[in-house]
Image (spheres, rainbow, N blue to C red):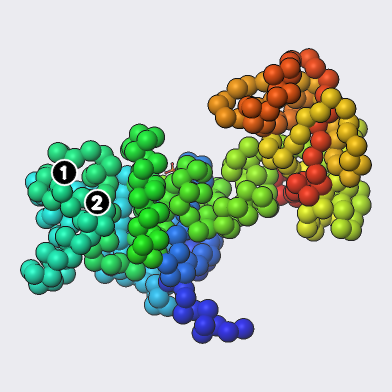
């Protein structure tokens, strides 16, 4: 193993960090490595431990066990102000009586940077976040998105090794949120900042992150790039938390490159060609995304496909796509997403008997004992 080469790229390392409040475990022993220039999001439901982990990295909370390393240096016991990390919160925490310029200059003044250099650096960073026309305004004279850009500029200006953000766009409305996501992504690309970003918005996490750390009940459920989380979830929790999914309970009945799962309640069987470690006899969930399923009047010609006879329960128009809700034998509920422009949709009605078909390569098998 080439440990030296690996550690060179590592900016932040969280090593067996946990947090206990009395007998309540807010964070179970957690390992996390963030490389230089990487944008990692902590994504998970309320109370899953996102802020707890971020606060431990920030130095705002002390871990019960474990260590935090920044560029290989143990900072676990270093006071927050000496860690030099950038912080952006949901509430911007700008200094109300200071102008935009002075708010952004503040961290440099505190660090004793010379006046000329402060002016140059503040102007440059305000141009980067596109606030160079508003330098003399007070925070109260700015929109929410502009205030949030000031607080981001206030971090960028002293070039911290990591920027920590806790739901920074949580207070903004949808349009502004999306514009700011684009802005943050642009800054990340342009400046190569390293960021640890907390959100409970899956679209935001997917739009921004190199990797997403999905958290559940104080533990990391899965840590991967967005595409892998979506197409190769390792648990029912992740499959259901990220996007929509169909999850069919059953039992593995074969092994090899194509694995067969017999569904519960005699509902039939499905096949998967996705890599899987489950053995014959083990309980499994077969999972497929609603957009990878087709609907047809007949079982179709492709023998390799999975098929289930279903009854249509409803068709919902949700803009560019429509959701068809169906029910198969064994009381299995299925959701299929089709482009609304798809012609056969127009004639589909509740009560229709149809076939759903999908490919074994779009079928993921999940360990059922994992999410019991
Ligand atoms: N100071 C504290 N004392 C006791 N329990 C705490 C304390 N801080 C957090 N917790 C608990 O730890 C768990 C994790 O909290 P945390 O704030 O990390 O969640 P979160 O994922 O950030 O949630 P949210 O999305 O709601 O912000 C929660 O159950 C919370 O109630
Ligand atoms: Mg939180």
Q: Classify 285 as above or below 69.
A: above
Residue 12 in which image quadrant: bottom left
Q: Which residue is mark 2?
A: 130
Q: Classify 326 as above or below 283.
A: above
Residue shown at 75% from the left, 46% from the top: 362
Q: Is the residue marked by circle 1 packed among few (<14), some (14-19), or many (20+) residues within 10 Å?
A: many
Residue shown at 13% from the left, 70% from the top: 117
Q: Classify 366 as above or below 116.
A: above
* Label 2: which secondary element: loop
Q: Position of residue 66 (x, y in %)?
A: 48, 68
Depth check, mark 1 against mark 2: the one in front is: 2
Residue 334 in which image quadrant: top right
Q: Position of residue 367 (x, y in %)?
A: 75, 50
Disc 2, ligand 2: is the CB inside 8 Å?
no
Q: Classify 242 as above or below 309.
A: below
The residue closer to the viewer here, 246 or 331, is 246
Q: Which residue is mark 1?
A: 139
Q: Are marks 1 and 2 in contact (CB under 8 Å)?
A: no
Q: Is the residue marked by circle 2 packed among few (<14), some (14-19), or many (20+) residues within 10 Å?
A: some
Q: Is residue 238 visible?
A: yes
* Label 1: which secondary element: helix
222 displayed left or right of 160: right
Say which quadrant the C terminus sits in: top right
Residue 278 in which image quadrant: bottom right
Disc 1, ligand 2: is the CB inside 8 Å?
no
Residue shown at 87% from the left, 58% from the top: 257
Residue shown at 48% from the left, 49% from the top: 207
Say which quadrant the N terminus sits in: bottom right
């Amino acid at each position: 193993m080439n440990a030296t080469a690996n550690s060179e790229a590592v900016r932040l390392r969280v090593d067996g960090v946990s947090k206990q409040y009395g007998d309540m475990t807010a964070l179970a022993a957690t390992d996390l490595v963030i490389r230089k220039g990487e944008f990692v999001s902590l994504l998970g439901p309320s109370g899953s431990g996102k802020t707890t982990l971020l606060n431990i990295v920030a130095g705002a909370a002390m871990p019960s066990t474990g260590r935090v390393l920044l560029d290989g240096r143990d900072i676990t016991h270093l006071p927050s102000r000496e860690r030099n990390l950038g912080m952006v919160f949901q509430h911007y925490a700008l200094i109300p009586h200071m102008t935009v310029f002075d708010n952004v200059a503040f961290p440099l003044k505190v660090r004793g940077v010379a006046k000329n250099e402060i002016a140059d650096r503040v102007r440059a960073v305000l141009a980067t976040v596109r606030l160079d026309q508003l330098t003399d305004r007070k925070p109260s004279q700015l929109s929410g998105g502009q205030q949030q850009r000031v607080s981001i500029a206030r971090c960028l200006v002293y070039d911290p090794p990591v920027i920590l953000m806790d739901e920074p766009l949580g207070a903004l409305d949808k349009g502004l949120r999306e514009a700011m996501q684009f802005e943050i992504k642009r800054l990340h690309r342009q400046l190569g900042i390293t960021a640890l970003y907390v959100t409970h918005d899956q679209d935001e996490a997917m739009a921004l992150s190199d990797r997403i750390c999905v958290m559940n009940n104080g533990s990391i459920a899965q840590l991967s790039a967005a595409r892998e989380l979506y197409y190769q979830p390792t648990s029912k929790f992740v499959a259901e938390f990220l996007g929509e999914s169909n999850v069919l309970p059953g039992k593995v009945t074969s092994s090899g490159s194509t694995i067969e799962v017999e569904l519960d309640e005699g509902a039939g069987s499905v096949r998967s060609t996705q890599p899987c470690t489950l053995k014959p006899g083990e309980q499994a969930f077969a999972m497929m995304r609603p957009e990878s399923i087709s609907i047809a009047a007949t079982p179709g010609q492709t023998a390799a496909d999975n098929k289930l006879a279903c009854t249509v329960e409803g068709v919902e128009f949700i803009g560019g796509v429509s959701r068809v809700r169906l029910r198969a034998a064994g009381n299995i509920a299925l959701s299929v997403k089709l482009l609304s422009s798809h012609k056969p949709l127009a004639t589909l009605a509740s009560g229709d008997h149809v076939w759903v078909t999908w490919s074994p390569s779009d079928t993921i098998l999940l360990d059922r004992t994992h999410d019991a």
